[in-house]
Every structure is written in C-alpha cells, then in structure tokens.
Image (cartoon, rainbow, N blue to C red):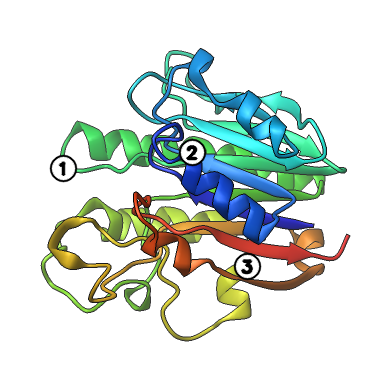
C-alpha cells in the first residue's frame, strides 16, 4: 500500500495538479490538507472519475482535510480531534482503508508567536498526543500523515536565521512533535533517510523554490506494527515545480501489507 500526504493549498484551484500527480504517482491512499473549500464544494466527482473514493471535512476559505483511497471508499471513523467540542476548525479526519486506520492531520501554523495562535497550536498538539496515545495502547495499525507545521530539527530546514521567531521551529513545537513520536511512532521518512534534507515545503516568497530553500513540515508517522512493514518512501519534488503548484510537495511511503 502506497500512502501519501499532500498539502494541496486549495483543492479546487489545484485540481488539475492533483489529478496529474495521482495519474503519475498512483498512490493507494492520499491524505490531503488545506482544502480551502466548503463541504459541498469538494471535488468528489472528479476524483471518483479517476478511481478514488473520498471522505473529507472541509471549511470555507481555510483549513480542510480529506482522505482518498484508490478503488475504495474510505470508512470514516472520525472527522474531528477529541478533547475540545467547541473547536470547529477542520484539521483532523480519520478513516479505515484495507484494515489500516489512516489519519489526515493539519496542525495549526501558530504564527505569530507568542500569542493566541501559538497557544492554540500547542493546545491542539496536546490533544493530538492524547488521541495518538490511545492508538499505541490499543495496538491497532495506524498511519498518522499530514502537515504538522513543525520542523523537527535543525537539519530539517535550510540554513537561515530569518525564521528564528517562527512558530514552526520553536522549542515548544519541536518538543511536542518529539513527545508524540516518543510514544512509539516511527517517523517514516527519517527512518529511510537518516541524513540530509527532506524538504516538503518551499515558501512562495523570495524564490525559495528556485534556490531550494525548503523545510520539512509534512510527516508520516507509523504505529509499531506498520513500521515493520515499511519498504520505501520519498518526496515527489517535481510536483512543486509544476505551474500553479502548491507550496508543498507530496511525501509518501510504501508498506508491505
């Protein structure tokens, strides 16, 4: 099973980009983030026409997450994160596909920090950590994939001091991600490629794609039983170079199921 995560940055605006990538990469499961579409405006028919069933939790103008499955309809298990019934932001969705529980995750950005947006990011992360701990305890096969809006370590970002105050690299953000992984999850791409850059995001500003000044924000975490089945993975960098591209590129892994 090939599982990918892709922050599409407006699914309708970049539908053609998405369809081209699906045809070329042929992922079995795709976790999308930042749909930026109302619930009724998600392009389910266009995706079904190319063989993908979908579940989604959309939000007008902002956020939004989805799970696509090739040749299947994902079985929705959860469309919001536990721990705060008043939080309506569309940042988490969970579904079963071929016996594996898949979550598509869009962690809050948190900028500017310090401030309420950063506080929300950290509080949301705490809820994710609590929810994920339940999976580890239950021992179920799970993949947590998405845009975590965290640069885990200094080697996951190009050399710069201009972003020292950015919420993506703050110690609190990195500690939250590290605590999540320490529950027993495997950071799949770092397992496969322990050294070197694994950029998944290049800001539109200041020609950062042109100069390959990227960072790693998109992560695929595997539960213990899934980590034993990890075969290969990578970043489809070519997608970022296409016309009308998202500022993210898809990250993917293949599991032997």
Rendering coords of residue 229 (x, y %)? 82, 67
Horizontal side, residue 210 vs residue 18: left or right:
left
Disc number at residue 188? 3
Rendering coords of residue 12 (x, y %)? 44, 31
Q: Secondary structure at mark 2?
A: helix
| Residue located 46% across and 25% down the image | 90
Vertical relation: 188 (above or below) 183: below
Mark 1 or mark 2, earlier in chain: 2
Dot 2: few (<14), some (14–19), or many (≥20) neighbours within 10 Å? some
Q: Nearer the viewer, residue 23 or 199?
A: 23
Disc number at residue 112? 1
Inspect this view and state whether residue 241 appears. yes
Spatial separation of the CA atoms under disc 3 and disc 1: 29 Å
| Residue located 48% across and 61% down the image | 178
Circle 2 sits on which residue? 15
Mark 3 or mark 1, earlier in chain: 1
Quadrant into which the N terminus falls: bottom right
Rendering coords of residue 120 (x, y %)? 31, 33
Q: Quadrant of residue 165?
A: bottom left
Marks 1 and 2 close (CB-CB < 8 Å):
no
Spatial separation of the CA atoms under disc 1 and disc 2: 30 Å
| Residue located 49% across and 18% down the image | 41
Disc number at residue 74? none
Dot 3: few (<14), some (14–19), or many (≥20) neighbours within 10 Å? many
């Amino acid at each position: 099973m090939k599982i990918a995560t892709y922050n599409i940055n407006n699914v309708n605006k970049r539908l053609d980009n998405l369809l081209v990538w699906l045809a070329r990469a042929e992922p079995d499961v795709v976790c999308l983030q930042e749909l930026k579409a109302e619930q009724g405006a998600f392009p389910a028919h266009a995706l079904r026409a190319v063989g993908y069933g979908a579940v989604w939790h959309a939000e007008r103008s902002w956020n939004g997450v989805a799970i696509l499955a090739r040749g299947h309809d994902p079985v929705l298990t959860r469309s919001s994160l536990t721990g705060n019934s008043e939080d309506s932001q569309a940042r988490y969705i969970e579904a079963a596909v071929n016996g594996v529980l898949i979550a598509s995750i869009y962690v809050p950005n948190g900028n500017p920090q310090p401030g309420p947006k950063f506080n929300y990011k950290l509080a949301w992360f705490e809820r994710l950590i609590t929810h994920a701990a339940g999976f580890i305890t239950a021992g179920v096969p799970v993949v947590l994939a998405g845009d975590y809006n965290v640069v885990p370590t200094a080697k996951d970002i190009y050399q710069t001091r201009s972003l020292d105050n950015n919420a993506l690299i703050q110690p609190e953000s990195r500690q939250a991600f590290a605590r999540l992984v320490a529950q027993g999850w495997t950071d799949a791409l770092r397992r496969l490629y322990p050294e070197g850059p694994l950029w998944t995001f290049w800001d539109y500003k200041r020609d950062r794609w042109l100069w390959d000044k990227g960072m790693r924000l998109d992560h695929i975490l595997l539960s213990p039983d899934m980590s034993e089945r990890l075969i290969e993975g990578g970043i489809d960098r070519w997608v970022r170079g296409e016309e009308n591209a998202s500022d993210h590129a898809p990250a993917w892994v293949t599991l032997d199921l």
